[in-house]
Amino acid sequence: MSKYFMLQDQQKCIGCHACEIQCKSHKGLPNGPNPCQIIPVGPQMINDLPRASFIFMPCFHCENPWCVSACPTGAMKRRSKDGIVFVDHNLCVGCKTCITACPWGAPQWNPEIGKVVKCDYCMNRIDEGLKPACVTTCLTHCLNFGQTEHMPLIKRERYAKAMAASKGAAIHD
Amino acid sequence: MEKEVYSLCFMCSIRCPIRVLAKDGQVTWIEGNPHVPGMEGSLCPRGVAGINMLYDDQRVQSPMIRIGERGSGQWRKATWDEALDLVGNKLKGIIDEHGGHSVVLGERTQLATHVSKTFLKAIKSPNHFTHDALCKGSVNTACRSLFGYTDGEIGIDYKNTKNIVLFGRNIFEAVAVKEVNNLMYALEHGAKMTYIDPRVSITATKAHRYWMIRPGTDLALNYALINIILSERLYDAAYVNKWVHGFKELQEFVNDYTPEWAEKETGISANEIIDFAREISRDKPNVIFHFGYRGANHVNEIYMRRSILILNALMGSIESQGGLFFKKGPGAEGGKPARKLVSQEFPKIDVPRFDKAGTPDFPLPDPAHGVGQILPYAILNEDPYPIKALIAYRFDPLMSIADTNLTKKALDKLDLIVTIDINYSDIAWYSDVILPESTYLERTDCVQQMNGLKPQMFLRQQVVEPRYDTWDGVMILKQIAERIGTGEYFPYNSVDELVDWQLEGTGFVRDDFNKKGFVAYGKKQIFWDREEGLKFKTPSGKIEIKSSLLEDAGFSSFPAYESIEPPPENKFRLVVGRNAQHTHVSTQNNEYLNYICSENELWINDKKAAKLGINNGDQIKVTSAVGQGTIKAKVTNLIHPEAVFMIHGFGHEAKSASRSFAKGVSDALLQENIYDKIGGSPAYHDTFISVEPL
């Protein structure tokens, strides 16, 4: 795992897809590749109320990334200072081994350049002290980004408040 | 070279404040204005797709003159001089022969609407209308009937609410960034949300209570709620005694509308209605019965909207924290608003509007917006007089006015159709001349007067030079005016000069907007004193549940409820709505937005679909009395069996917009052009359609 963590607050996500579009816009991508993606599940009736989940899928930036091990040219790299996994387009030959290797489908195919693109937490922005594109403009601020140990304790806080108010549990989780 | 510009988005009409970065003349980044509470960087999907519109090579790149039949898509490129001369000459001929009132201009209300209105006033035409009337004319009339203010003068304090009720106001899909974030804040802090809709939307999935109401019966639900609130004395008695006119009459009126009666009509159990009335009254006055964003569903729309507003009045939530409030203008802080061109002296107009709004024939709709759906009838019947020319300004009558075939038939009678737009909209495609406007990233715009709890002004500012041969709308109209001899009403040579003229006397200058994108007249939120200081603009000075506006015009304040019949055998009530990726009819061809959502589907109840032999994903035929089309079926248990649903804005006919061309079905093609004859809204949900497998 990189030293960073991206936390999606499901309770606040409305599945609007602004994250996906900002990501594509920022990286200048054509239709097709989605370095991050919202996968809607539902709605379905749960205890007589309609509920839906919008699962946010970026790259998880693994500690021992399958994609890096699989890459035959060394194009897929893990940045030593913070563990961000990224593609060096000078070295990528478009063999797609990383797409096969990744258990979560994070590496994406960019047909315009015949190479792989993937979520790199917008490391150009991070190096400028900014947050990734998707997080910065997230409509409801449901995407949070930071160092893993500093991430907001959203779920614990929400649970604690609900408990204190004797409401049993968080309403949506 | 990198540059930072504060501006206003224009991917929809909300005008969210944005911060834009550009490098070497190219826009590189758009985010919500970080200085504005509720924005703080965030944007909606349409807002983040703005760069995509700027660089879209499928938008109209230069003035175009039609050379084939109308709608044939045969065009030739023209210079601005040539196109403007053509429009000017034709218009001049029409005005000389038939009078200025034979010219109609329809537009989506925007910052330069005062310029469009000036254009018509100068030629003695009363015929300006806005999209607003098609969206919420009856909400406007309902608000005026109760408070003397329009809906546009009323705001909602989502952030501090304790309990909110949404009647199909799909707030988490038909999104406005600040609203979403303020409501999300309230929910995070314990607010309760009730959502009422025949269909499960994303908003329903976030609600604490969801009612799949029988379509068209919200009014029955509200009368039953009022019944309980009165009989159990759950209302804010002090507020009601002081500020409500017609309380006794209301009591007598709702006496028979019991929860048990409403259960039969709406399908919502009487006990649930009673429990809910008791629950929400505990949170008064910090409650919101949302009066709607679009309010154009049924022929009795005005009474449905009034019933919602009456519920607020009973809760004392009007001019309350966490409830509704009246927007305060610069005057409340001793300031002055930006000037508008319509403040000039104009020649007197001595004919009624084409829609007769404000005359005894159609007394109550707001003439400031007009009634757009009357246009086809006015043209076809030459009633009240012949109409010869239409200027469609970022407004598409073919997809916004119900019954596209009827509208086309009317447009065919016109001598001139001119469209000012960015994209190849369907009306652009059907026009004689297209005058392309620059995108919001390529032009400065007129000042936004932002009235609210804290009066402010915002400014849309140019970020980059126009990419194609496009102009500012205010310069297009001025140049046409020059050619028809009314140029004197447009005392500016650029939009910058116009903005400077607007700001004269306000104490602010254009540079003041550079720091944060806006200027504020004061620092504190202004609420009127609820005990003594509520300034209702009705004749009684109170909230007129018994309405002089209605009754003076010969309408009842309390018409008896008429039961909603189920749809005829094998037919369904067509219900329409929005999602977060698209704005009305204007974004379907945007590459990224189209990629996320490229066509609409017809939601149909699973049990009904099984009977008809329709499977999920099937292409199906939909037919109404006025039109038909083919659409993909979405079979689901999440919609009421009497309704079918589709998203508005698909089924485009303009071939040059290739991504959206012929994708899905246009709701306007199927809907009948019927409307609320008192309030003015179209009745978009009063069309029944049949559905069959292909």
Image: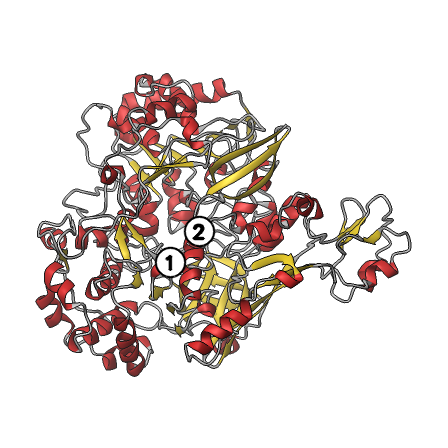
Q: Residues within 10 Å of mark 2 (few under 14, many from 20)?
A: many
Chain holding disc 1: B
Q: Quadrant of residue B508?
A: top left
Query: Which disc, if any, is residue B345?
Result: none
> Can residue B656 be seen here?
no
Q: Measuring 20% from the left and 69% from the top, which residue is drawn there? A: B561
| Vertical arrangement, residue B399 with respect to residue B124, above or below | below
Q: Quadrant of the C terminus of chain B?
A: bottom right
Q: Residue at label 2? A: B38
Give x and y (percent) for residue B601: 53, 61
Q: Measuring 25% from the left and 38% from the top, which residue is drawn there? A: B333
Chain holding disc 2: B
Q: Quadrant of the N terminus of chain B?
A: top right
Q: Residues within 10 Å of mark 1 (few under 14, many from 20)?
A: many
Dot 1 amino acid type:
Lys
Give x and y (percent) for residue A104: 74, 65
Q: Measuring 60% from the left and 33% from the top, which residue is drawn there? A: B22
Q: Quadrant of residue B543?
A: bottom left
The secondary element bearing badge 1 is classed as helix
Give the Cα separation between the discs numbered 2 and 1. 9 Å
Q: Nearer the viewer, residue B575 or B243?
A: B243
Give x and y (percent) for residue A125: 66, 45
Q: Residue at label 1? A: B159
Mark 2–mark 1 CB contact (< 8 Å)? yes
Q: Earlier in the sequence, mark 2 or mark 1?
A: 2
